[in-house]
Amino acid sequence: MPAPLTWPPTVQWNTPAGEALQALLANMAADPGSNRLIVFGSGALQMTTLPELLSADIDVSLDIVQPSAQPASPVAAEELLRRAAKKTNQQSGSAQPLVQVCHWMTFQPAARWERRIHQEQRNGWQIVFPHPFDILFAKLRRLEPKDLEAFERHIATTARPSEEEFLALCLESYRDFIPRLEGETTHLPSPVSQRDLRKNVARLWPAIWGRSIDIDREIVEAAEKTLEMNWYNYPPELKNELARLGAVENQASREIGPPPQPPALERTEGAIEKKQGPEPGR
């Protein structure tokens, strides 16, 4: 019988992925300007919701968000992390998953994923675990056999995400499902997989929920209709407040008057002649 999904989770640091991550943190001191680490992929699922899920590596990326007088260079900070990962992998051999340092654009979850994260402090690092639904959504962009297996294992273990829950995630990211013309440049940069998300969704739905899905009607059009209704049903009290603020601003503008115009420059005949210079022959 599936166990209920618990979120925030109790992070399983004693799993192979957890031990590999701890070894990485031991090999690199945290820098206050670049100490936020995103953990994703199957390794993150192993540490949060699926401890039995095997993973050959643990994917991490550096997320530099801390402002400072001398901001850390993302390239330099990432290079230091790569060196620490290489040292960690050499020390572990084949005893634990390899640490894979990814470009920060590699992880492409659903929209508003930051609202669902779990974050822990460890050795001066901020370790960020995305919600399992967002990890699965990111896997949907590739959907290799091991990615489909992660869907099946997660639903078999927790009975989630339900079809309704995962469809809601797709609705959040509906722009990713809008068809593009052949040869049209994608909005995703080159480090991100360019595989067809629409085709992957068409493969996922029958495999997991036993039916086909009309992507245009159930995702794109449904999301656009929801947005349209939300604008139409804009809270009247907020409308009134915005109108009041607009009236106050207009009144203030009338009382202050139009901004002063810069004085016109007088152009004398001598100045014009000086600017133009003598005519030829003079």
Image (cartoon, grey):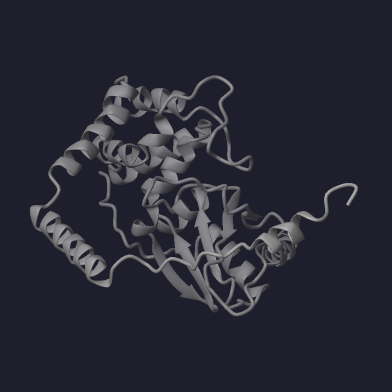
Identity of the residue drawn at 59% across and 22% down: 183
Identity of the residue drawn at 60% across and 62% down: 20
Q: Is residue 233 above or below residue 61?
A: above
Viewer can see residue 11? yes
Viewer can see residue 213? no
Q: 195 or 118, which lies in front?
A: 195
Q: Position of residue 271 (x, y in %)?
A: 69, 63
Quarter-wise, where is residue 219 in the image?
Answer: top left
Q: 90 or 44, which lies in front?
A: 44
Residue at far right of view: 281
277 relative to 34 in the view: left or right? right
Q: 51 or 249, which lies in front?
A: 249
Picture quarter with the N terminus: top left
Identity of the residue drawn at 46% across and 36% down: 140
Quarter-wise, where is residue 185 in the image?
Answer: top right
Q: Position of residue 74 (x, y in %)?
A: 65, 63
